[in-house]
Amino acid sequence: MKKLFTLAACALMASAAWAGVVTLDMNNPLNPTTIEYGDNGVWTQCYNDVDYTWLEFGNDKGTFMLSHLIDGEGASWGGYYWDGFTPAIGGDQNDYGQAGSSAGWTTMFGGCMAGGGCVINADGSVSADPAEPYFVAYYSSWAYEGPSNQVMFVDNDGNSTFEPAGVYICNHPWPYYGCEHGDGFGTGFAEGDYFELIAHGVAADGSEKTISINLIEFTDGQLIALNDWTYFDLSELGEVESVFFTMNSTDVGPYGMNTAAYFCMDKFQVKVADDPVEPVTVGAPVFQGYTIDGITGYGVGITPTTEGSEIMYRVLIWDPVAEEWVLRTDWTLYEGTEGEIWFENNGEKVRIEAYAFIGQNVSMDVAYEFTVATALDELMSGKTVAGVRYFNMAGQEMQQAEGLTIVVTTYTDGTTSAAKVIK
């Protein structure tokens, strides 16, 4: 019976609210605890079929387990065979095939056409780094004890179902050069030929979904190949107990596919729920209102009471006919560094509503109500304004407030006050 190339994984329970991904990091090995590479860029313990039939890599969310020799101890046949996943490094892009022969690939199978392991940059782009490891994957249709190339992820709570997010893939040199000009088994591709990677998702009830991507195809007279790290989106598979890969080629013979059954894989990702976030108590903002001269307007400043918080505000005007507050401006981010909110000489009754927030944590709404100043005898803190003088930041007196202005107010009791305002 034909065996399938399998990638299985176990992760968080389906009832969790998925918010991010957890990524397999090859730089955190658990079994083996360290990985050493030979001159050919391949893991030196590749044919150890006693200690390393499965590989393990740690993560703060759990443990990834990858099959290396699915048929278990003794399956390397004395150091001549492996299936599943093998760590590699360096990104060798050389062609070790010869006309009519693939013998050179038997020891030099550690390369990838991207030129090194997959690096996800801060802006979301990807690149290849020869100093970063990756997996060479070999699809075996002859495994006896289960599908080759299984990957499992067990979270810290032991949950066994997951939603796959995706994985980065690229071509291995052997099938690439084989499809380009042929090798000891395959022939060079012609119009309409393709080499395909198929992902199968198996749900808990045994039902299956599949999605596929062409690794290599010959279209419109051109050989098109995924020779850079390419994201293979697996999210359409939904909630599954396992994912496995099969490979398909238009170049087939009496014993199956002639194209070399290799590809490269890195950064396998499953969806996870975010860690619980402790709620942040956000204090309600504080209002500060004042007339600048008792005649031309009223300023309102809003101050956050919690460090790092921001403020949203909106303005409403009282409609005396309808006897209700009418929205004048919708919710707006308060830019305190640009000055207060100013209301000119119109005598209207105004209400400002505001709330403070940090991320998704918000305070209760608070409101501030006032009537815009309209006359010289406007009272401020129980005092009557006698006069106002305006000065710029150089200390020069001006006829009216303009730009950043120092406003000096003199009251009828002989006292004065100064305020810096932006007009």
Image (tube, rainbow, N blue to C red):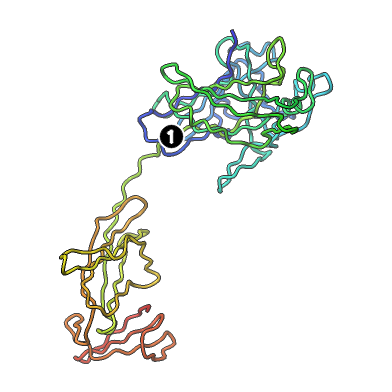
Residue linked to disc 1: 272
Q: Describe residue 163's horizontal placement relative to residue 282 as left or right.
A: right
- The location of residue 276, given as percent across then percent down, is 35, 40
Q: Residue at x 27, y 58 (%)?
A: 283
Quarter occupied by residue 86? top right
- The location of residue 367, given as percent across then percent down, is 22, 63
Q: Residue at x 60, y 17 (%)?
A: 69
Q: Describe residue 106's horizontal placement relative to residue 234 as left or right.
A: right
Say which amino acid is labelled 1: Val
Quarter occupied by residue 52? top right
Quarter occupied by residue 311? bottom left
Q: Relative to 171, is 282 above or below? A: below
Residue furthest to the right = 99
Q: Quadrant of the C terminus?
A: bottom left
Q: Relative to 85, is 387 above or below? A: below
- The location of residue 34, given as percent across then percent down, is 60, 30
